[in-house]
Amino acid sequence: MKNTKFSLLALLPLLTTVLASCGGQTVQENDNGVTYVHVLNAEDYIDEDLLGEFEDYIYERDGKRVSIIYDTYDTNETMYNTIQTGKTSYDLICASDYMVQRLANEGYLHRIDHNDVPFYNNFVSEFLSNDDPSNPGKLNLLKVNNDEGSFELDDYSAGYMWGTLGILYNPEYILNFNSEAFDNDPEWKDLSHDERISKIVETFEGDDGYSFLWNPLLNGTISIKDSMRDTYAIGNFEVFKDFYLSESTYDERNEKFNDSTNDTIELIKNKLIELKGNIFGFEVDSGKNDIVTQKIGVNVAWSGDAVNSINRGYYADDDWTIPREDPVDLYYSAPKLGANVWMDIWATPESSVPGYYESDTYKYTLEFLDYLNMPENSIRNVYYNGYTSFITSGTNTNYDEEEAKAMLAYMLYSYDLSDGDENSDYESYDLYDVTPFFNFTEEFTVDLSYVSGEILEEEVDDRTFTFKKDENGEVKILIRTDFDSFEGRLLKAQYPEASTIDSLYVMNDYGPQNDKIVQMWEDVKVNPLPLWITITLIVFLVLFIGYLGSYKLIRIIKLKNRKKMRENSSK
């Protein structure tokens, strides 16, 4: 932080606002009539141009001056400490689902009425937020219990971005790095190069997707997250693989996914220690770059980071406009066995300031939250950060017809390789079903030109796509793509296949078991050395100590001899 002298009088209006907000949100405007909204979000996670555009939008609409004070944090735990200590207060925060769940359980959050954020309420994907008990959204599966009663996490939040935890990999790197091992392996040695590539892809996408990480063929090519939750999930899938493949219900499998009993922690710890012997190393944020620069060939990754890496492997420039002459072809898989669905969500901290919930500060906090959920603004954030928005599209809204289809129009523009003609030759494409993630119930047509000047500052062709009801009276959203193409690999990273929807699980906060899992993770990272190394060290220490002892004994004898010689010579 730079040391700069200021005039106290010049800063007095701002200090009044800041001091009023310490220890709890402010309901005061400063002397200039500006309403401040304090927002806390993860680093590099939003198109910051939207902050100023929101301020202009409110001024043009209401004649009111609103200022978004925007701060960022590096980890969820840093954010948690900030909120818990109360040294700095915020009107709106964005964090991962488990951390918001923890804050809600501990009474730090205020419930959000989704009717107060109408864009979100109308456009949110029912896959993620749906209070229908027969078809609950993923946020509805996470529970909150505090002094107010029992709730769903959905009651305390409005979603922002979501995705899966899966495996990002480079088949060519894997084959080249351990070529001799593949040549000698009975299952692989008779396969051609292209057949080996196909087998790697099929393995990562299938029931053995996680088990493959333990395979010696991948030794030295893998980096895994230095994150106890993400890596615990990988270990859980491997330990309970047979259970996930059994005829159990979704609720039973999701409960198993959240198993944090002492016995399970021990089983997963041992499995992760075993995995540690097969990896290149741990990483927090470097994996998405290391796999592009080909330091590694496999990375346990979040889907949004995978999108970033796939793009950077394909394009030569930071603007993603010039393809590489020699691209790095990366693939992402959320294995068929199952995947963790993570969600980053917005929440409003509880305030004890009298009149806060009737103030302009709280009013414009919710206005800003809903501004981010306008379909066109959601698309801009998706375009900026590569993640998947909670906001989709549907025909069950009361909004502008084209606006209601904006997110799907963006998807079709980005990923569909056909010309939009319903009579196109389907056999030349892979059909990718994303129906569960959208809310369309009636037949409709999408015109891509809406995305062009309105949302993206680039030319978008005027293709149109028509979606009709099938023989069962359902509207299917099928994207025509090629899974081996750049577009197809990006599509798979952003949206899981509809056929795997019953294998997407949500992870609760560990609650009272959190400290034990923290200890488990420390044990994994600093587990005892292999036996042969331990024996070698012991032998070395014994020899070294013996050497020191012998050296000291010899030195004592020499000193005695010299002393005796001096005594004799003086006689």
Image (cartoon, helix red, strand yellow):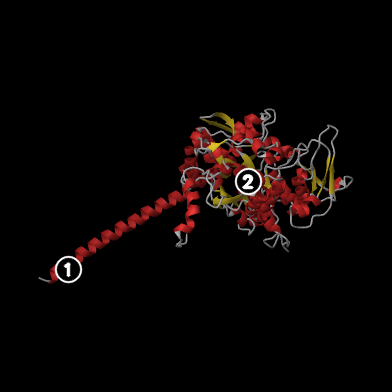
View extreme (left): residue = 571
Closer to the camera, 65 or 192?
Answer: 65
Residue 344 placed where, x, y %?
A: 61, 43
On the question of residue 482 being in view, the answer is no
Q: Residue 372 appears at what percent x and percent y?
A: 66, 46
Residue that appears at 51% across and 30% down: 147
Q: Is residue 389 left or right of residue 403?
A: left
Report the residue that reaches farthest toward the right.
423
Q: Secondary structure at mark 1?
A: helix
Question: Are the two marked residues, 2 and 1, in contact with CB atoms closer than 8 angstroms?
Answer: no
- Above or below, 17 against 514 in this view is below
Q: Is residue 439 visible?
A: yes
Q: Nearer the viewer, mark 2 or mark 1?
A: 2
SS for callout 2: helix
Q: Is residue 565 above or below residue 8?
A: below
Q: Quadrant of the C terminus?
A: bottom left
**Amino acid marked by disc 2:** Phe
Q: Give the residue at x 79% y 45%.
A: 402
The residue that label 2 is drawn on is: 368
Residue 345 screen position, x and y as percent: 61, 42
For marks 2 and 1 on the same chain, the one whose residue lies earlier in the sequence: 2
| Image location (x, y in percent) of residue 7 | 45, 60
Residue 478 lies left or right of residue 557; in this view the side is: right
Q: In 3D space, how far apart are the residues under numbered discs 2 and 1 (Cα atoms)? A: 94 Å
Where residue 459 sits, quadrant-wise, is bottom right
- Please give the residue where the numbered disc 1 appears in the rendered image: 565
**Which one is in front, 128 or 175?**
128
